[in-house]
């Protein structure tokens, strides 16, 4: 690379990328013809999730791929259930299967569809409410692929179904004690008792008792609102509910202005906390933390927690908490011990939007995870850049104004980058469909293609290098230090693609591409 300002490197990367290697910009909401998404459910190990629109009578399966350094969202199967009305429950398995509840007049049917078949195949009936005396209290897939249904009054039993010989069969029935509520969570059935006021945990795979948890009597008044969920690693039990202290304004209250004002003040004081989440250690069975909430439907009417959900992302796990009809939601980083603190995050109330590609509708859980990862990538890259500057900062690397400019290091990294691509594509020079490396008389180095172009050149401004990444009609400028570090971190095995003016990659390190906007000095998702 020459020292003159006129010399330029042009890198254009074009791949014949197969469709399964692309990451399109999903508009999940449009998969349901623009109707409201009423429910989002995840498989036991978070491999898949499903979005459901009750008004549209549709369910869409999505792959939620989490591997080392990789996050990928891709549409899986779409079901249009015109002849029925969707109802709860909806469950997803780690083996590409989904259970859907359909209601007909005065009865409902639970059916399982195999998403390995085209368009989900034909649903196989698992349960018909007309053939069972007990009400379905809760159900869910187990990690071994079996399906569990818990029935309440008057039968109080659990059914285990297994997929054998291409069909679902009832393989066992487990008699349960009489309970107030029950939940299937991570291969366990959690049974809420009235007296004593405890939760009993049984393992559905081993059929063994595991733990008993004593509950806070502050939740005893509204037992029907209690929710129970085990963490993905089964180390924490989350219990959410409505507190006993909640009261609503009496309709016979004296409406004289002074008395009414005093009453409202007292009411607000009493309703300062109306819901709480407790975290139990499954090892000790004791409470290690709790978080209180004060959410309202209106100025005077409170609402309790409607759903809780654990999702694990790489090494971190979050508990998602929803109020009412999921209009308000939070994510909590749960405590690992009684001495550790809780971290509370507010989830976006509306789908995320991208200025470059129009509206990008994502479920709140996925949107939060992507934003959380983006912030982590930002912080990690800033630390790396700081270390990079310290390692390479020398007197001869400064210009006349004392501004640091690691020109040699940048050029070396660019040269290494080009050499790697050249060596990896030496055998493909003869083919017009693969990348080839050439050098023209102006000493421009080009990797042929039209998907996107890297232009790296010297500028007269502060005697620095500048770089532009051009994707169709957009250009993002980054400073030399960020470019150098980005080239060092880039996995050259990655393939890239541009859709809707966005650059995507099948690997996490490039999905949230580590590029700073020069003026604002912060990461952008492009």
Image (spheres, rainbow, N blue to C red):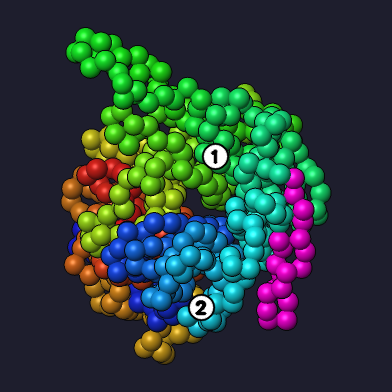
Residue at 73 percent across and 69 percent down: it is 170
Viewer-closest of 232 and 205 = 205
**Which image quarter: residue 466?**
bottom left
Q: Residue at x 74, y 36 (%)?
A: 212
User: Is residue 113 positioned above or below 315 on the image?
Assistant: below
As for residue 166 lying within the magenta part, the answer is: yes
Q: Residues within 10 Å of mark 2 (few under 14, many from 20)?
A: some
Give the x, y percent position of residue 365: 44, 50
Residue closest to the eye, 15 or 393 = 15
Between 247 and 281, the residue placed more toward the observer is: 247
From the viewer's perspective, is residue 106 above or below residue 312?
Answer: below
Q: Which residues are magenta?
A: 159-177
Q: How many numbered markers are drawn?
A: 2
Residue 126 pos. (x, y %): 62, 71
The residue carrying pointer 1 sits among few (fewer than 14), some (14 to 19) or many (20 or more) residues within 10 Å by Cα, namely few
Q: Quadrant of the C terminus?
A: bottom left
Q: Which residue is mark 2?
A: 120
CA–CA distance in space, label 1 to label 2: 35 Å
Q: In the image, what residue occupies the spot 58% across and 65% down?
A: 129
Secondary structure under badge 2?
Answer: helix
* Disc 1: which residue: 224
């Amino acid at each position: 690379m020459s020292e003159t300002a006129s010399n330029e490197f042009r890198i254009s990367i074009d791949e014949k990328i197969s469709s399964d290697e692309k990451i399109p910009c999903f508009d999940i909401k449009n998969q349901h013809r623009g109707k409201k998404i009423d429910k989002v459910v995840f498989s036991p190990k978070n491999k898949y999730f499903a979005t459901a629109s009750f008004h549209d009578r549709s369910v869409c399966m999505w792959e939620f791929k989490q591997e080392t350094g990789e996050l990928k969202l891709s549409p899986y199967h779409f079901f249009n259930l015109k002849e029925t009305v969707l109802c709860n429950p909806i469950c997803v398995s780690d083996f590409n299967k989904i259970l859907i509840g359909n209601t007909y007049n005065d009865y409902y049917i639970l059916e399982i569809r195999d998403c390995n078949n085209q368009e989900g195949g034909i649903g196989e009936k698992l349960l018909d409410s007309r053939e069972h005396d007990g009400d379905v209290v809760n159900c869910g897939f187990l990690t071994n692929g079996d399906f569990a249904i818990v029935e309440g009054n008057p039968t109080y039993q659990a059914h285990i179904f297994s997929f054998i010989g291409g069909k679902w069969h009832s393989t066992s029935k487990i008699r349960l004690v009489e309970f107030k509520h029950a939940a299937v969570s991570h291969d366990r059935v959690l049974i809420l008792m009235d007296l004593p006021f405890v939760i009993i945990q049984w393992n559905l795979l081993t059929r063994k008792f595991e733990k008993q948890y004593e509950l806070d009597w502050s939740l005893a008044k509204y037992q029907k609102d209690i929710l129970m969920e085990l963490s993905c690693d089964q180390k924490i039990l989350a219990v959410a509910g409505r507190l006993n202290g909640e009261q609503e304004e009496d309709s016979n209250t004296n409406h004289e202005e002074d008395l009414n004002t005093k009453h409202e003040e007292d009411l607000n004081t009493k309703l300062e906390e109306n819901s709480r989440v407790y975290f139990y250690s499954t090892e000790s069975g004791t409470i290690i933390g709790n978080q209180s909430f004060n959410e309202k439907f209106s100025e005077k009417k409170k609402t309790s927690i409607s759903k809780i959900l654990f999702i694990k992302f790489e090494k971190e796990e979050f508990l998602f908490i929803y109020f009412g009809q999921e209009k308000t939601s939070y994510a909590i980083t749960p405590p690992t011990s009684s001495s550790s603190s809780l971290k509370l995050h507010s989830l976006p109330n509306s789908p995320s939007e991208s200025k470059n590609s129009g509206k990008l509708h994502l479920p709140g859980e996925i949107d939060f995870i992507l934003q959380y990862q983006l912030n982590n990538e930002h912080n990690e890259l800033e630390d790396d850049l700081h270390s990079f500057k310290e390692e390479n900062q020398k007197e001869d690397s400064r210009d006349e104004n004392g501004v640091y400019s690691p020109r040699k290091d940048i050029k070396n990294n660019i040269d290494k980058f080009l050499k790697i691509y050249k060596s990896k594509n030496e055998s493909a020079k003869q083919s017009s469909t693969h990348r080839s490396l050439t050098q023209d008389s102006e000493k421009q180095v080009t990797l042929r293609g039209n998907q996107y172009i890297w232009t790296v050149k010297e500028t007269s401004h502060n005697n620095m290098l500048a770089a532009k990444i051009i994707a169709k009609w957009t250009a993002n400028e980054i400073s030399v230090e960020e470019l150098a570090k980005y080239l060092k971190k880039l996995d050259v095995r990655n393939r890239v693609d541009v859709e809707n003016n966005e650059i995507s990659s099948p690997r996490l390190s490039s999905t949230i591409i580590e590029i700073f906007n020069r003026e604002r000095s912060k990461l952008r998702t492009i």
